[in-house]
Amino acid sequence: MNQNLEPLFVPGQKNFEVAYNLALKLAAEKLSHISDIEDLCRKSGSTCLLSVSPQIISLRYLNRLYQVTLPDVQISFTENTEPVELRDKILILHYLIQAKGTPLSGQMISFHELKEAAVYFPTFSKRVIRPLIEHFGKNPDHLSRVSSKLGGIAADFGDSSVTIPAFSRVPVTLVVWKDDEEFPANANVLFDSTIQEYLPSEDIVILCQTIIWKLAQLGNRL
């Protein structure tokens, strides 16, 4: 378990909203106690507006601009007053708090290569890999069209693949192989080897699940 951040899930908590609110509160408290906000913005690739009141951290998450106001740690969209999903708020705060500023390596790894992968892979497979296959396994080209809404850029893996800049330092690459006469459809998710310098394993699961959910919703509208 990551020692710097509270987990996104609270073990034994039946009411996920209570658990999420607790995780949000803990993350907000951690952020409010960070004195060097400029260093935090540098490490996370965010923008600091510290000369205004309230002070603002501005960052892009899944191709939308968000702002975090300080010292009250409120999270909102920059361009409108639409409410921000609770789990998105937590991911944004965890990213800001954990970011080490490590340059991207360009070396791709799978979920199996993450720390604590064995603990989280069953959930990752169920909530990320399986839905990715179900939504795009029969028509991989659809993945490229849909992912453009999240800032997706074509990659060179499988029958179709895209790299989505979830955060400025967290690219997530989705790969799909369509079914054929010999093999069923398959999928994988690849990360830069530095990803755990920015998010712990449990948050990586939630981030990927969120990406797949958003892609499925966008696909239903086309």
Image (cartoon, rainbow, N blue to C red):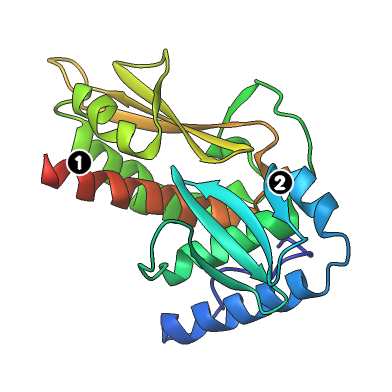
| Mark 2–mark 1 distance (CA, rounded to whole Å) | 33 Å
Residue type marked 2? Ser
Helix or strand or loop: what does disc 1 sit on?
Answer: helix
Mark 1 residue crowding within 10 angstroms, few (<14) / some (14–19) / many (20+):
some
Instruction: Report which residue position mark 1 lands on.
Output: 134
| Residue 98 horizontal side relative to residue 195, left or right | right
Q: Evaluate whether residue 12 shows in this view.
A: no
| Residue 9 horizontal side relative to residue 99, left or right | left
Q: Position of residue 181 (x, y in %)?
A: 12, 15
Pointers 2 and 1 in contact (CB under 8 A)?
no
- In which quadrant is the C terminus drawn? top left
Nearer the observer, 155 or 120: 155
Examine the rendered structure and indicate whether residue 78 appears above or below residue 30: above
Q: Residue 44 bears which disc, if any?
A: 2
Residue at horizontal 20 percent and vertical 41 percent from the top: 134
Residue 22: quadrant of the picture: bottom right
Give the mark toward the camera: 2 or 1.
Answer: 2
Q: Evaluate whether residue 181 shows in this view.
A: yes
Q: Position of residue 215 (x, y in %)?
A: 28, 44
Examine the rendered structure and indicate whether residue 37 appears above or below residue 182: below
Residue at horizontal 38 percent and vertical 68 percent from the top: 81
Examine the rendered structure and indicate whether residue 217 appears above or below residue 26: above
Residue at horizontal 31 percent and vertical 26 percent from the top: 176
Q: Position of residue 132 (x, y in %)?
A: 29, 40
Q: Residue 145 bears which disc, if any?
A: none
N-term-proximal mark, 2 vs 1: 2
